[in-house]
Image: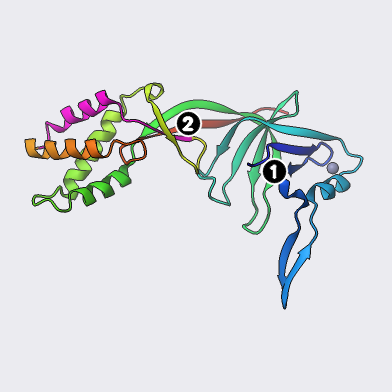
Amino acid sequence: MVSDRFIWCRNCDAVHHVTSCDRAPQYVYVEGGVEEIPGDDWRAFMKQHEGHRLEPLKASGEKQFCQSSMSDPMGVAYIEVTNGRDHLLLRQSRANIAEPLSFEVTRGRLVDQGLTVCIQDSEIKKEMRCHFKWYADAFDDQKIDLFVQLFRDVVTVIEPETIEVAGFFSKDDNVTFGLLPADVIELLMAKCSSYFQPRELDDIRRFIDSHGEPCDVLALVMRRQLKIEQSAA
Ligand SMILES: [Zn+2]
């Protein structure tokens, strides 16, 4: 688990992330072998900022990954922290892949702007192409695109808050997966009936029935939109 504690030097505006790696040595490759560099980032930080005004900061709730995925080592994240009185925002970034994460204090808050709902367009298309591959009168790309377009239209009428959360996305804290509600499936089938032949409708129904699991391609993608609201110091 990633630590949610930081030390902030008010004199230098420097931030140290308190982690379990603080005392871990670093290993560097040198000619003929590996060399150990004793590490103690916490002690080094405390020494560097000796006599300065230090404040502990603790993550207070919201966290946002700006570049959508926390698996991206270069991704920028904003973390809400508090020193017990004020709410502050830490900007987490990395200058390059070899550097450790660095943190910077900014005044501001993450403002929740609600959920947006979308479908997994490209995954659905890929799955449909695979699903209909063996059919004599296969669903061609045009029909698949049409289905995806109709699905996308239907989803716009759903109130995000009414969707049952079915799973979480390990790479982004702001994304959850939602179950496709039964009445939305019926709405989609009704829309499809204007464009597809009865036999194609049966095929679509079977595709929907066999891909409705929470982890499957028909699951809805709900993304929480957070805005960074800067405030004056
Ligand atoms: Zn300092």
Residue furthest right as drawn: 51
Residue matched to label 1: 103
Which x, y percent locates residue 196? 11, 37
Above or below for 190 versus 148: above
For residue 195, which quarter of the picture?
top left
At 65% across and 59% down in the image, what residue appears? Answer: 98
For residue 1, which quarter of the picture?
top right
Reply yes or no: does residue 186 show up in magenta: yes
Relative depth, front residue between 212 and 92: 212
* Applied colour scheme: rainbow
Relative depth, front residue between 95 and 222: 222
**C-alpha distance separating marks 2 and 1:** 23 Å
At 71% across and 32% down in the image, what residue appears? Answer: 58
Which x, y percent locates residue 82? 71, 28
At 7% across and 35% down in the image, what residue appears? Answer: 198
Reply yes or no: does residue 191 show up in magenta: yes
Which x, y percent locates residue 131? 21, 48
Above or below for 225 versus 98: above
Name the amino acid type tagged 2: Arg
For residue 230, which quarter of the picture?
top right
Query: For the magenta stretch, what is the residue range?
Result: 175-196
Q: Secondary structure at mark 1?
A: strand
Name the amino acid type tagged 1: Phe
Residue matched to label 2: 224
Q: Quadrant of the C terminus?
A: top right
The first of marks 2 and 1 along the sequence is 1
Q: Is residue 207 left or right of residue 75?
A: left
Relative depth, front residue between 117 and 201: 201
